[in-house]
Amino acid sequence: MGKIIRPTYPKEFSIGLLILIFFLSFFLSSQIFNVTWRQLLDGTDAYLGMFLISSAVIIMVLILWEEFLFPLRIKESANGVIFRNHRTKLKTQLLIYCIIPAIFAFVYLEFEIRTVRFFIWAAVCCILPVVIKLVSGINNYNDFLKLTDDAIEYKNNQKTGIFALKDIQHIALTRDERKVLHKIQVVMTNGNDVIIDLDEMELEAFMSAIDKFVTGHYKNLVKENRVVA
């Protein structure tokens, strides 16, 4: 179990927000079904479909708002920390994501729908999690950054390396205009240098913790801070 470094909102607030989103989705999803307001007021089988669509929306929100189910944690090693795109989180997200297309397929087959509106809702719920979270997580499944008192180790797709601190001449940090850390340049005593592209490794959520560790533990090596637009 890793250490939580950025707690999410209070649970009561988070659950309340999810309930609000559910009821808003339930109300608005009526436009998907081929029913009148009179039928809705008198009772209709479309209520089951509206419940299912609202459930799909909530699942989408839970994938996008991953800190609700997966508070941000770092894994501590013997003498340092490991930052990675958590594999258990990604597997769980993929599993619950499969429920979304299953819901829309069931609704399409079992209810009278307004086709255009149905496919707009289906596209939003099915595509957003893939584009924003799942593709990036899969691409960076094995990526990690390990910082210890003795070495820096990382993997970024095909790029990988381990650098003993005794062999490092200095470290340069690159930040964006908001002063958020983006890259770490490691310059070795033999003249070689390597740039660790943190912004390519799905480690955005850990940037503050990485910055704090590097500037704290390697302060004698950090010689340069760059800001890029």
Image: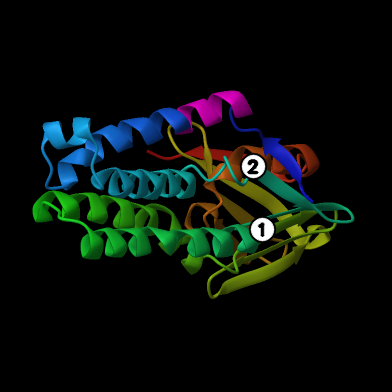
Q: Position of residue 37 (x, y in %)?
A: 13, 32
Left or right: 131 as drawn, with respect to 178: left
Work out whether mark 1 precedes mark 2 in sequence or the reverse, and give the earlier one: 2
Residue, disc 2 = 71
Residue in the foreground of this view, choosing between 141 and 128: 128
Instruction: Please rate how many residues cluster around mark 2, counting C-alpha atoms within 10 Å: few if below 14, some from 14 to 19, many from 20.
Output: some
Q: Which mark is residue 145?
A: 1
Q: What secondary structure is found at the residue carrying circle 2? A: loop
Residue in the foreground of this view, choosing between 86 and 168: 86
Instruction: Please rate how many residues cluster around mark 1, counting C-alpha atoms within 10 Å: few if below 14, some from 14 to 19, many from 20.
Output: many
Q: Is residue 221 magenta?
A: no
Q: Is residue 86 visible?
A: no
Is 20 above or below relative to 88?
above
Q: Is residue 16 magenta?
A: yes
Residue at point 49%, 59% (across, down): 96
Residue at the right extreme, as displayed: 78
SS majority, magenta: helix
Residue at point 38%, 52% (across, down): 132
